[in-house]
Amino acid sequence: MTKAEGKTFDFLDESHINPQLLEIFDFDSPEQYIKTETDEFSAVCPFSGLPDIAYVKIEYYPTGGKCIEFKSLKYYFVSFRNVGIYQEAATKRIYDDLKSALETDKLQVTTVYNIRGGFETTCIEGSFS
């Protein structure tokens, strides 16, 4: 919860992010490059209580023999919607949860947040090395 100009905004803590929503299926093509993007990611700034809206790009090679089912990824992203989490931490959390689910080191998550207060923020976690 945060207060801004006499108003109170309530939000949830990070325990409400639900990686169990991620559904994985077997996929035997470790050299295939997979990229998925959305501009429908949102969470809550724990400082201001205001929404943080971002474009998210996920790139990976299924070296662990697994792929993410996209509808489940959408539900997973929705679990962030009312959670107070900093932009950098949200990017790292998405990366960590996907890395664990996909069992690959060839994963990169990029978030580009809408401009707020004159600042454009891009966060990148992971690499293809």
Image (cartoon, helix red, strand yellow):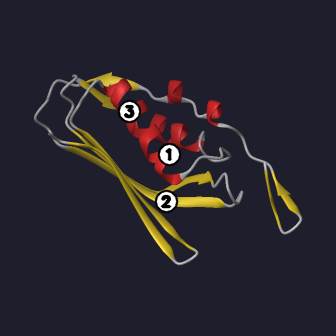
Instruction: Name which residue lies at 72% across and 57% down.
Output: 49
Residue 84 is left or right of residue 6, and the answer is left
**Three-letter code for the amino acid on which mark 1 is drawn:** Ala
Whichever of labels 3 and 2 marks the residue nearer the N terminus, that label is 2
Marks 2 and 3: in contact by CB < 8 Å? no
- Where is residue 34 shown, x and y percent of the image? 23, 43
Q: Quadrant of residue 13?
A: top right
Q: Classify 10 Å Cα crowding around label 1: few (below 14), some (14-19), many (20 and above).
A: many
Residue hosting label 3: 98
Marks 1 and 2: in contact by CB < 8 Å? yes
Residue hosting label 1: 90
Instruction: Name which residue lies at 58% across and 75% down.
Output: 117
Instruction: Name which residue lies at 58% across and 43% down.
Output: 78
Residue hosting label 2: 54
- Where is residue 99 shown, x and y percent of the image? 34, 30
Q: Please tell me whether mark 3 or mark 1 is closer to you in this view.
A: 1
Whichever of labels 3 and 1 marks the residue nearer the N terminus, that label is 1
Q: Quadrant of residue 80?
A: top right
SS category of the residue bearing label 1: helix
Kindly report the distance in space between the C-alpha atoms of the residues bearing marks 2 and 1. 10 Å
**Three-letter code for the amino acid on which mark 2 is drawn:** Ala
Residue 126 is left or right of residue 3, and the answer is left
- Where is residue 31 shown, x and y percent of the image? 10, 35
Q: Is residue 119 above or below residue 129?
A: below
Whichever of labels 2 and 1 marks the residue nearer the N terminus, that label is 2
Q: Classify 10 Å Cα crowding around label 3: few (below 14), some (14-19), many (20 and above).
A: many
- Where is residue 41 shown, x and y percent of the image? 52, 53
Task: Please name whichever residue, 103 or 3, is drawn nearer the observer in this view of the structure.
Answer: 3
**Three-letter code for the amino acid on which mark 3 is drawn:** Leu
Q: Please tell me whether mark 2 or mark 1 is closer to you in this view.
A: 1
Instruction: Name which residue lies at 89% across and 65% down.
Output: 6
